[in-house]
Amino acid sequence: MSPHLPVTPDEIAEAAIGAAEAGAAIVHLHARDPQDGRPSQDPVLFRQFVPRIKARSDVVINITTGGAPTMTVEERLRPALELRPEVASLNMGSMNFGLYEMLERFKDFKHDWERPYLAGSDERIFRNTFKDIAYILQSCSEQQTRFEIECYDIGHLYTAAHFLDRALLKPPLLIQSVFGLRGGIGGHVEDLLHMRRTADRLFGADYVWSVLGAGRHQMPLAAVSASIGGNVRVGLEDSLWGGPGKLAISNAEQVRRVRSIIEALSLEVATPEDARRLLKLKGRENVAF
């Protein structure tokens, strides 16, 4: 859909390094089949770019366990389980995950699989049952990987609290609140404030809060989050846009844009070491790559 999406291991490595150089403290990584750009959770592909990112940057590496809704939980977990990163993402619930409306905005596709993949999302459920979540947490329990807890709705916060009570999650939690995806909570400022109030009530001082706004919501919600003491996530996974009607050319462009917002608010951009300290991460020397 966008010619600027990194697809090959070389492109993904350079995109992540560029984002780190622009000011990102953490980079969240997916892999793609370099032949046709399909989402892939093949650890062999991840091993072609994560060591290069680590060698050229101090950035915290965060590997997805989300992969794609079409994958089994065992497939989705393989890269994090084998590579033992400092951080891995984990969605807190099964949900409708509608991307089909993007067909109204994009007409040109490079690969044959893209259009039917989007069109089929109106009947697709992204599965993350309580059993699936427990499986991922228990499988990674000995490697000290912390999780980016992705919460697409209020109920996901309560699920995170449930696994905190079961001691499968340990504080401080990195709560990534996701707004504006069809099937999850909306992208209004009131939705953001409701999510923040609920997280404060459930977790008190035992969490670090971050906001991800999808599509056009990316920069406005990032600005609100930063202004009320939250952190922000940006990138081409979440929004293809660099402004109204203009495609962003890189992840680094979006990092620079949000950095200008943060600094205009007289705030400081966190370094990778700040992130490691705030989240009590195990350190880059304790990963398997």
Image: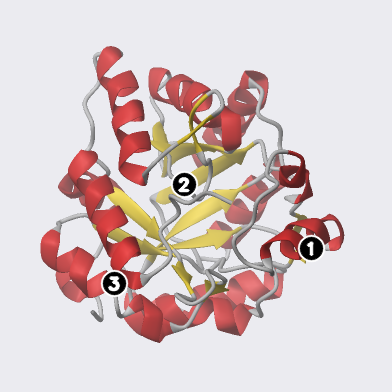
Image color mode: secondary structure
Residue placed under numbered mark 2 in the picture: 236
Residue placed under numbered mark 1 in the picture: 125
Q: Where does residue 193 sit, x and y in percent of width and height?
A: 59, 23
Determine the CA span between mark 3 and mark 1.
Answer: 30 Å
Q: Nearer the viewer, mark 2 or mark 1?
A: 2
Q: Element under label 2?
A: loop
Which numbered disc, 3 or 1, marks the residue that appears first in the sequence? 3
- The residue depicted at 34 percent of the width and 20 percent of the height is 261
Residue placed under numbered mark 3 in the picture: 49
Determine the CA span between mark 2 and mark 3.
Answer: 17 Å
Kind of residue at disc 1: Ile
Q: Where does residue 191 sit, x and y in percent of width and height?
A: 66, 27
Q: Element under label 1?
A: strand
Determine the CA span between mark 2 and mark 1.
Answer: 22 Å
Determine whether 283 is above or below 191 in the image: below
Which numbered disc, 2 or 1, marks the residue that appears first in the sequence? 1
